[in-house]
Image (spheres, rainbow, N blue to C red):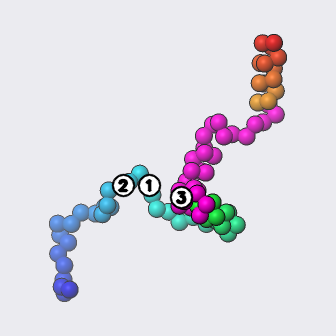
């Protein structure tokens, strides 16, 4: 090991190119994490991959919960057609 290193020509920034993923720290309830780990063991996927898939699915419009207003709108449209 050298006593001194010359960083005068060094550049700041990430050492590795971005892969489209970011490492973060997140706090999850123990039971949630245990469930994802169990599912990961059964599916052969990593638990972090399953958490990412669940978050992505939760953001998609088709996964939005059915509300009373939406149900009324659909029924009204269907009854109007019939």
In three-dimensional space, the C-alpha distance between marks 1 and 2, rounded to whole angstroms, equals 7 Å
Say whether disc 1 or disc 3 marks the residue closer to the N-terminus: 1
Vertical comparison of 40 with 73: above or below? below
Image quadrant containing the C terminus: top right
Q: Residues within 10 Å of mark 1 (few under 14, many from 20)?
A: few
Residue 41 coordinates in the image, percent (x, y)? 59, 64
Q: Nearer the viewer, residue 9 or 67?
A: 67
Q: Residue 45 shows which numbered tag?
A: 3
Residue 30 coordinates in the image, percent (x, y)? 67, 69
- Which residue is label 2 attached to? 18
The quadrant where residue 69 appears: top right
Residue 54 coordinates in the image, percent (x, y)? 61, 51
SS under mark 2: loop
In three-dimensional space, the C-alpha distance between marks 3 and 2, rounded to whole angstroms, equals 22 Å
Q: Residues within 10 Å of mark 3 (few under 14, many from 20)?
A: few
Q: Is residue 49 magenta?
A: yes
Residue 28 showing in the rendered view = no
In three-dimensional space, the C-alpha distance between marks 1 and 3, rounded to whole angstroms, equals 17 Å
- Which residue is label 1 attached to? 21
Q: Which residues are magenta?
A: 41-69
Q: Residue at x 36, y 55 (%)?
A: 18
SS under mark 3: loop
Residue 59 coordinates in the image, percent (x, y)? 60, 44
Q: Residue at x 61, y 60 (%)?
A: 42
């Amino acid at each position: 090991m050298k006593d001194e290193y010359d960083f005068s020509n060094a550049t700041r920034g990430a050492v590795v190119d971005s892969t489209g993923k970011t490492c973060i720290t997140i706090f999850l309830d123990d039971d949630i994490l245990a469930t994802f780990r169990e599912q990961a063991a059964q599916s052969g996927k990593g638990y972090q991959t399953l958490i990412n898939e669940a978050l992505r699915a939760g953001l998609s419009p088709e996964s939005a919960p059915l509300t009373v207003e939406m149900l009324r709108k659909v029924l009204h449209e269907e009854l109007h057609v019939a």
